[in-house]
Image (cartoon, grey):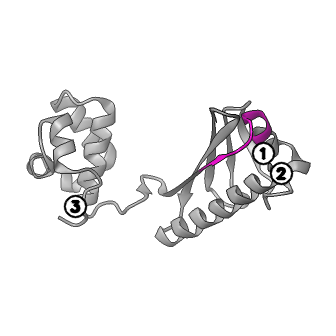
């Protein structure tokens, strides 16, 4: 095995009927070491009754265990996630993302949004790169809001740590301006 699995053997066995050693044996015997992500998922779809989610999970686990995929790596580069719950209503938090004057108080870029779902989510490209950012907003009790950021298409593992630190700082700054 190349990397430690993200899910325990017990969890995988409980949901799929096989542990990691079982899945490794099955997929190795089928020739999956030389297959793409899509090919492995297609094989699992054709030969098992796993749900789509578990087809993906077993495939990613297999790829990690066989050294075909690193932590935070997707088929389109690396991905960093960050979330924070902020003491402000969802409408206020969303406004500080989409109103340019308010956004300047905490964020040092000017996103060009490809998707704006009011009080639900935003998508935009990182300026001057192919990186993509998705932002989700979830209302919580007592006028609190959880902001979840997924920053995709990062070039390498170092960029993941740097990007998580960046979004942590920016979300802290957003929380400060909303106090």
Q: Residue at x 57, y 62 (%)?
A: 164
The secondary structure type at the circle numbered 2 is: helix
Residue to which mark 1 is pinned: 97
State which tag comes first along the sequence, 3 or 1. 3
Outermost right residue:
101
Asked if 62 appears above or below 128 in the picture, the reply is above
Give residue 30's position: percent from left, percent from top. 12, 46
The secondary structure type at the circle numbered 3 is: loop
Residue to which mark 2 is pinned: 103
- Residue 35 in view, yes or no: no
Residue 68: name its quadrant.
Answer: bottom left
Distance from Cα at disc 3 to Cα at disc 1? 40 Å
> Image check: 91 left or right of 102?
left
Q: Are marks 2 and 1 in contact (CB under 8 Å)?
A: yes
Q: Is residue 82 magenta?
A: no
Residue 105: name its quadrant.
Answer: bottom right
Q: How many marks?
A: 3
Asked if 128 appears above or below 86 in the picture, the reply is below
Q: Which residues make up the magenta segment?
A: 84-93
Q: Residue at x 28, y 58 (%)?
A: 64
Q: Residue at x 20, y 43 (%)?
A: 12
Asked if 65 appears above or below 20 in the picture, the reply is below
Task: Name the one closer to the observer, 173 or 80.
Answer: 173
Give residue 26's position: percent from left, percent from top. 10, 45
Residue to which mark 3 is pinned: 66
> Image check: 135 left or right of 30?
right
> Image check: 102 left or right of 8?
right
């Amino acid at each position: 095995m190349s990397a430690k699995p993200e899910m325990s053997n017990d969890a995988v066995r409980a949901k799929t009927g096989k542990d990691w050693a079982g899945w490794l044996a099955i997929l190795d015997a089928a020739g999956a070491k030389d297959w793409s992500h899509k090919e492995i998922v297609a094989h699992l779809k054709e030969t098992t009754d796993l749900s789509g989610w578990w087809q993906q999970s077993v495939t990613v686990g297999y790829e990690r265990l066989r050294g075909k995929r690193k932590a935070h790596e997707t088929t389109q580069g690396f991905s960093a996630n960050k979330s924070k719950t902020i003491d402000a209503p969802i409408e206020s938090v969303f406004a500080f993302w989409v109103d340019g004057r308010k956004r300047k108080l905490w964020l040092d870029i000017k996103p060009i949004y490809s998707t704006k779902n009011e009080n639900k989510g935003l998508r935009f490209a990182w300026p001057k790169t192919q990186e993509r950012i998705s932002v989700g907003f979830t209302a919580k009790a007592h006028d609190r809001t959880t902001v979840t950021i997924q920053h995709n298409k990062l070039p390498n593992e170092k960029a993941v740590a740097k990007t998580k630190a960046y979004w942590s700082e920016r979300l802290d700054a957003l929380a400060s301006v909303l106090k």
